[in-house]
Amino acid sequence: MPPLDLLMAVSRLRASAPLVHNITNFVVSNITANALLAIGASPAMVQAEEEVEEFVRKASSLVVNIGTLLAPQRRAMHLAARAAGEAGKPWILDPVAIGATTWRRETALSLLTLRPAVVRGNASEIMALAGEGGISRGVDSTQASEAGLDAARRLASRSGAVVAMTGAVDYVTDGERVLAIANGHPMLTRVTGTGCTATAIVGAFLGAGLPSLDAAGSGLALLGLAAERAVTGAAGPGSFQVALLDALHAIDGEALAAGARMHWA
């Protein structure tokens, strides 16, 4: 299979400046918005159930993240996801800590029936969403990404969504094809919200009109390469977070195409 056209992906993203509607958790709203701005997208953090249906029709794509789940936000997520489907707008689901509580699991499963274009999670989250026993310790994964690959394939086949499973190696699958992405750095685990940021970046590529698998692969490779660049000279998590935004801004299509380490598994 041919490699992803990463040069085209970044050029398309920067040229279109997609408006990304985020219904996300309050821990990561700031870093998510800044990361989207850094890559050339336009973030909107619109969460009130009274306006999400109207707004999502104006957006290029929708990001739904259940990290700090509240009842009004849950209602807004369902309203926005339905409206996105009706309007033909792609959306991505991040089932944060789905295995932690029954309510969280029921929320993610009900959102999955609304047909997201992409589901992004760690191995534990993907296994739990697939009904295959992923155990969550809060937002942290207790499984290596390789352990969840079969579950990711089955989840993609059943749901129709591309599944992007992140870890030391990231895997993206549509149920048949599997793309492995080896970019990244362990420092990503020392800053809150980097997984949520990955979801939002993939959402931006969806908003730029890329097919789901290409959007997921491009987004994860971009964040992974940015982490590798950011860690150079960073004194710790604080300076790394700032450098990560700078790296996301600086990486163009040529740099991503040259630095991405990905292959069809």
Image (spheres, rainbow, N blue to C red):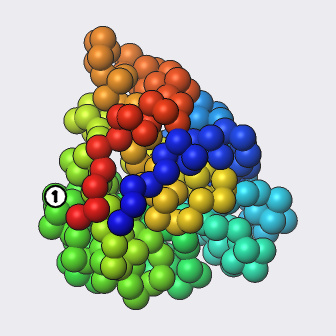
Answer with left or right where residue 204 lies relative to residue 148. Answer: right
Q: Residue at x 39, y 55 (%)?
A: 3
Q: Which residue is mark 1?
A: 144
Please say if 109 is above or below 40.
below
Q: Residue furthest bottom?
A: 158
Residue type at numbered disc 1: Ala
Residue 46 appears in the picture as rendered: yes
Q: Residue at x 66, y 59 (%)?
A: 209
Give x and y (percent) for residue 192: 38, 38
Residue 35 appears in the picture as rendered: no
Q: Judging from the image, what secondary structure is the residue with disc 1 in?
A: loop
Give x and y (percent) for residue 52: 76, 63
- Tell me the quadrant of the picture where the C terminus can be found: bottom left
Please say if 186 is above or below 79.
above
Give x and y (percent) for residue 162: 44, 71
Q: Residue at x 52, y 36 (%)?
A: 253
Please say if 143 is above or below 109.
above
Q: Residues within 10 Å of mark 1 (few under 14, many from 20)?
A: some
